[in-house]
Amino acid sequence: MTTQTDAVTVPKSAVPTRRVTRRSVLIADKVADWGIRIGGLSVIVAVFGIMVFLMQVVVPLFTGGRVLAQQSFKIVGAADTLVAGGLEETKVVAYTIGRDGEVGLYHVASGQRLAVPLLDFGGKRATAFGRSIVGGEIAFGFADGTVRFGKVSLSAEIVPATALPAGLQSLGADRTDGSAVFTPISGEQFRKTAIAVELDAEQRIVDGRSIVAIDYRSGGTVERPVRTFVTVDDAGVPRLSLAETRVNMLTRQARTTVSTAELPPLPTGTRVARAMVSEKGDQVFVVDRGGVVFRYDTRDANDVKLAETRDLLVGDVLVGSFDFLIGEQSIVVTGSDGSVAVYFRLPQPGAATTDGFRLVLAHDLKPQMAPIEAFAPSERGKMFVTADAGGGVTLRHSTSEQVLLSLTQTGGAPKLAVLAPREDAIMVVGADGTATVWDVSAPHPETTWASIFGKVWYEGYDEPVFTWQSSSGTDSFEPKLSLVPLIFGTLKATFYALLFAVPIALLAAIYTSEFVSPRMRGTLKPVVEMMASLPSVVLGFIAALVLAPLVETFISSVLLAFVTLPMALVIGAYLWQLLPRDMSLRFGGGVKLSLAFVALAVGVLMAAYAGPAFERAFFAGDVKAWANGDAGSGGPFTFLLLLPPAYVAVVILSERVLGDWLGVEQAPPGLRTGMVDGFRWLATLLAAGAVAAAVATALTAAGLDARGGMVSTYVQRNTLVVGFAMGFAVIPIIYTIAEDALNSVPEHLRGASLACGATPWQTATRVILPTAMSGVFAAIMVGMGRAVGETMIVVMAAGNTPIMEWNIFSGLRALSANIAVELPEAVKDGTLYRTLFLAALTLFVVTFVVNTLAEIVRQRFRKRSAQL
C-alpha cells in the first residue's frame, strides 16, 4: 500500500524568524547582573567591616598591660632605711625618703642625684612613718614620744628659654642647675621640675614611750586646717589625736592645738605592724604582725569602742602590708605566704560588733610566689603594686581582680615600691640600692569579660552586683561598667513594646487581609503605614512631655483600659451577630470599621468614668501607694494578671469538652446562634474569673505578691510609657509585613476552607495564618529589631536609669540610649569610649543572632507551607 503526500509550499514571510536581542540590551543586562552582584557583596563587606571596626576599638579593653621601657639607677645611702618615695608625673625625676630624714632626688634617665634640703630631725631617727595616698603629706614618729608632720611634693612649671639659669649641666636631653631639672618641650620653652620639702615643729604625744606606728590624714579649710592622726606606742596604747590650726586673718600667725584621746589598749604582747585612720577620723585600724586587726569605732571621741577584732591571715603567716586604696574603703592585706586580699567594712545583720559593721573579704587576688615586701597604691584608682622577696613585681587592679603586669626586679629583696601618679610607671628599689623604673601602659585596668558581663563587688555594696555608673563628682570614684543592666534594659523595653504592638498589628493585618473589601484595604493600609513616617524623636518628645504626665494622672483609668477596650470590642462583635443575616451582609467593611471605633470610644469612656472606682476596689484607693507597698494587698492585681491565662484555659477546655454538645459552630447564623454564643462567652468569662480569683487567693495566702516584681515604685517616665511610644513606632512595620504575608496565601486555600463550611474567622486563624506563619514571624522579628535599636524614644521617655527590675512602672536604660547619651562625653580611646563601642558591638551581635535565628525558623515554616 502506497501513500502519496502532496507537497505544500509555505511562503517565506510566514516562517517565524528568531528575534535577535540588541547588543545594548545584552550589555545593560550584563552590567545590571554584575552591579547587583557587586552591590550585594559590598553590603556584606560593609557589614563585616563595621564589625571588624568595632572589634578593633574593643579589643584593647582586654589586653592587660605592657612594658614600654626599662631603666635603672643607684640610690645613695642604705636602702633598708627607705620609708617612702615618689615619681614625678612625667617620670623625669624620682625621690626617696629615709628614716633619718634624708631626701634623695634623682634624674631617672641618668641616675644623677640632685641637691635637696634635708628633713632635719635634730639627729633623731624615725621609729614610725605614715603618709597620705595623695598630696605627699608625711608623718614621723620618734622614740621620745614625739611626732612631726611634713610634706614632700614635686612641682612643675613652664619657663621660657630666656629665663633659664646660666651654667646648666647637661643630662642628656634635659638640663639641671643642681636642684631642678629643665626639660625641653615644644617651642622655646622648658618644663622646670623641682622638689619642695616642708617640716613642721614636733608635737609630743606621750612621755617616755616610743612611737611604733603612725598614720595621718589632713582636712578642714584653709583658715582652719585639721590633722587627724593615730599613734601606737611600744606599750600597745593607741591614741587618736586631732591637731587643729587656727590662722589669724590679720597677723597671719598660726596657732595649733592638739587634743589626744587614748583608745582601748591592745592585748599584752601585741606586735604592732601598722596603724591606720580613716579620712573622717571615725575608724582606726591597728594590725599586728600575725594579721590580727583591731578596729576601733571613733565616731564619738568621748566613747571610743573596740568594735571588732579579726584575724585576717591563716596560721603563722605574717602580715606584709595593710594599706588603704584611694577612697579609703578598700584595705589591701598582703602576707608572708604571698597572699593578696582586699577587705571592705560593710554593715552586716547580726554582726558580733559594737557598730554593726565588720570587715568582709571582697576580693581574694592571685598570690605571689614569695613573701610580699613592698606595696604601692595608685593615686587615681584601684590599681596597686606588690613586690615580693623573690623579685616578683606585680601590677594589679583590686576590683577586676586581674594581674595587669608581672615583672622581675633585680638588686635583692625590694625595700620600696612606687606607682607613678598617672599609673604609667613603676619604681622598685632593691636591697642593694638599685632602683628599677619601668614605663608601663595599662589603660583599661577595670575591664575584663567578668567585670563587664558578670557580677562585681564594688566598694560600699553589700554583695556583687550588676551595675552601670560611668562617672561621678569625686576623684575616688570607681567607674562601674557592667553592660548587663543595659542589655536588660534593652530587652525590657523590647518586651513591653512588642507586648503592646504585636497583638494590635497582627489583628489589624488579619482584619485588612480577610475581612474588608479590596477598596477599603487600599485605604486602610497606607494610613497605617504612614505611622512609620513619624520621627522617633517626635514620638519620644510626645511620650515624655505629654503622655507620661497624662498616664501618671490617670493611671487607674489607663490600667482599666486594658480590660475595657477588648471587652467593648468583643461585646460589640457579639451584638453584631444578633443582627439578621440579610441586614449584616448589606453593611460593608466601612460600617464595621466605624462601629469598631464607636466600641473603642465606649471602652475609653468606661475606663475614664470607672477608673476611680477601679482604683478603690483593686488598689486601696491609690495606685502609687499600692505599688510602693504602702497600701492594700497584692491579691486583686494578681487576679487581674491571672484573668487572661485563665480565660484562655477555660476557652480551650470548653471547646474540647462542650463544643460538640453545644453545636454552636455548626448552627446557622442568626439571632439564636448569636445569643447562645454570647451567653457562652459570658459564662466562659465568669468561669475564668472564678478560676483566677481562686488561684489569686491561694497565691496571696502563700505570701506571693506581684509587687516588688512586675510592679513596684511608680516613676513618671517608666516602661509603660515607653511601651506605648515604641509600640506606636513598631506597629506599622509588623502590620505591613504581616499583612503582605497573609495576602500572599494562595486563594484556593481560602476558597477551599470556606467551601467546607468554615467561617471567615476560622479560615483566617486555622488556614491562612498557619500558612503565612513564615512571613508573620519575619514581621515580628523585624519589629523586634526596630525596638532593640530604638534610641530617641528610650532616651526621652525611659528616665535613663540603669536598673535591673521588671517593674513596668520604673525606668530603664538601653544599649542604644546609653551610647547616644555618653559617647559625646567619652574621651577618645578611653575606657568609657571603648566600652561604649563594646555596647555597640553587643547590639550588633544581638541583632545578628536574632535575625539569623529568625531566618532559620522562617525557612522551616516556609518548607512546611510549600507542601500545601
Image (tube, helix red, strand yellow):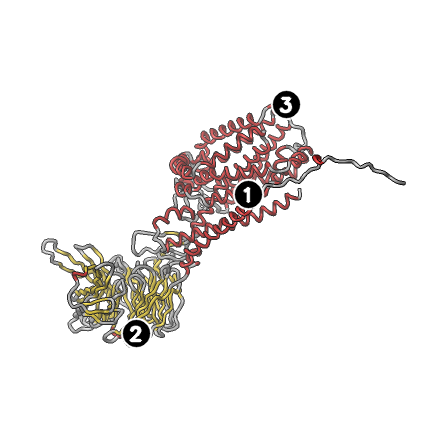
Q: Dot 3: few (<14), some (14–19), or many (≥20) neighbours within 10 Å? A: few
Q: Mark 2 falls on what kind of element? A: strand
Q: Could you give the CA–CA distance between mark 3 and mark 1, rounded to whole angstroms?
A: 59 Å
Label 2 sits on residue:
430
Q: Indicate which disc, 2 or 1, sits on the residue closer to the N terminus.
A: 1
Label 1 sits on residue:
28
Q: Dot 1: few (<14), some (14–19), or many (≥20) neighbours within 10 Å? A: few
User: Image point 49% across, 51% down: which residue?
Assistant: 45
> Which disc, if any, is residue 582?
3
Tell me, yes or no, if residue 215 can be seen here.
Answer: yes
Q: Indicate which disc, 3 or 2, sits on the residue closer to the N terminus.
A: 2
> Which quarter of the image is occupied by the N terminus?
top right
- Write down the quadrant of residue 692 in the picture: top right
Q: Indicate which disc, 3 or 1, sits on the residue closer to the N terminus.
A: 1
Q: Could you give the CA–CA distance between mark 2 and mark 1, rounded to whole angstroms?
A: 79 Å
Please identify the residue farthest to the right as the structure is shown: 1
- Write down the quadrant of residue 477 in the picture: bottom left
In depth, the one of 329 and 582 nearer the eye is: 582
Q: Mark 3 falls on what kind of element? A: helix
Task: Tell me the kind of residue under disc 1.
Answer: Ala
- Disc number lying in front (3 or 2): 2
> Which quarter of the image is occupied by the C terminus?
top right
Task: Tell me the kind of residue under disc 2.
Answer: Gly
